[in-house]
Image (spheres, rainbow, N blue to C red):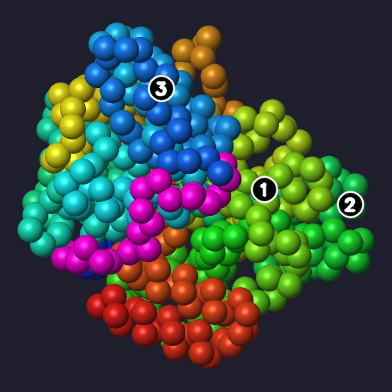
Amino acid sequence: MSDRRTRTAWALVPIVALIVAACAGAATPSPGGTPSGTAAGTPAGTQAAGTCAAGTTQIEVQSWWTTGGESTGLQKLFDKFNADNPTLCAYNAAIAGGAGTVAQGVVKTRVLSGNPPDSFQVHMGHELLDTYVNISGGSVLAPLDSTIIDPSKFPPGVVKIISGSDGKVYTVPENIHRANVLWYSKKVFADNNLQPPTTWDEFKTVADALKAKGIAALALGDKDIWPYGMVFETILISELGPDGFNGLWTGATKWDDPKVTAALTELQTVFGYVNSDHKSLTWDQANQLVIDGKAAMTIMGDWANGDYVAKKFTNYGWAAAPGNAGLYQALADSFPLPNKAPHPDAVKKLLAFMASAEAQDIFNPWKGSIPARIDAGNPPADAQQYNDYQKSALAEWKTDTVLPSMEHGAAASPAFKTAIETALTAFQTSGDVAGTVAALAAAAADAGL
Ligand code: GAL
């Protein structure tokens, strides 16, 4: 069987805006501002240096991981590194807000103004390259040599989108997440004698049956718009197929294609089956509705799997989102070395560890994802193991067709992503398909497509 991790599927992902002005991307709230999201009220940087012993060199790593599986995985990784390097102390300076809605703006301001943390969470692809690497004035991140990361141990398609236009590698990918997954409550399906849908038509049949019983078919937590955007992406994939979907990011598929119109119409229909309080919930609060049997399904990345692990919930099933079978929509969390990192030698040591199979097998069983390294996937017997979902993901990653995630930094420049989200936010209330198609087409034109 061929191993798709050795192919260059992601080489298709274009780096649209090679020169990005500092103003590109999402709003940039000031550090210390009130974060929103999963750990509401957690101030920036609370999981901070306080846990480090006096006299250690403290390595500030900024992330947006504040929920169970997410922060646990990073902490376990740091615990091992800190135990092996007693003079150093890596800590998670977490800023709450799923998908980095707050953290990304904070870190961008810090890095571009010359006051970076030692390292930070950033998605591979456009988010990394357009914001920090291929920018006017030159990269604000340092290239990583073979003492830190051995590119031959990572899929070529991944290496392609963690490398700058100079061909050098600029970040350490810690995982591969799958975005286009349908998670469901086995209890709700069994109690109602239903099967998980494989197409959007089946989804509607199932959703009508559930609606008749007063059960929300699809849990959604779009307090921030990105989970709704993820549902839209899965519908685009099912309407356009892999080549058509990839073409949206290269200009080969036009945003006024009739299939985009069909996808928006479908999105509007699907939106009719979500929980009524969706606008006040975060992604993990929506996932809790599935855990509690109050909703049947949710579409979310496999950090939802990490949420189930953390909450010790096992009565769930998973499938590709409707119309997405055989297609692995992917993203990766990664960690770079800013040129002005306060403790560069310590960070280099940390990143070299994070690039190892050992570290990736400590982190990922908790995170819900699979390791980015080709030779990882075998934690020691006494460590946290990959669960059944992750075993299936490790297998499908080798055989499925890989597609990039727009909402999580891989497919589109931050500015293009923001413009798409603005159009989708308006669409939720207007329901204006033609107007939204026009807005999306204009956003693509602005992105140079
Ligand atoms: C994604 C990130 C994941 C997870 C998720 C929810 O952007 O890649 O690791 O943190 O957001 O916050």
Q: Earlier in the sequence, mark 3 or mark 1?
A: 3
* Amino acid type, residue under disc 1 in the picture: Gln
| Quadrant in the picture for the C terminus | bottom left
Instruction: Decide: few, some or many residues near mark 1? Use Cα within 10 Å; few <14, some 14-19, many ≥20.
Output: some
Picture residue at 31% right of the left edge, 31% below the top: 60
Q: Where does the magenta region start and end?
A: 18-40
| Image coords of residue 266 (percent x, y) | 64, 76
**Direction from residue 428 to residue 77 in the image, left or right:** left
Q: Which residue is mark 3?
A: 50
* Amino acid type, residue under disc 2 in the picture: Asn
Q: Which residue is mark 2?
A: 193
* Residue closer to the observer: 8 or 371: 371
Instruction: Using the numbered discs, state the Cα–Cα distance from disc 3 to disc 1 in whole angstroms.
Output: 28 Å
Image quadrant where residue 85 sits: top left
Q: Secondary structure beneath disc 2? A: loop
Indicate whether 170 appears above or below 195: above
Instruction: Using the numbered discs, state the Cα–Cα distance from disc 2 to disc 3 in whole angstroms.
Output: 51 Å
Picture residue at 43% right of the left edge, 41% below the top: 44
| Image coords of residue 295 (percent x, y) | 78, 53
Indicate whether 192 appears above or below 51: below
Q: Which residue is mark 1?
A: 285
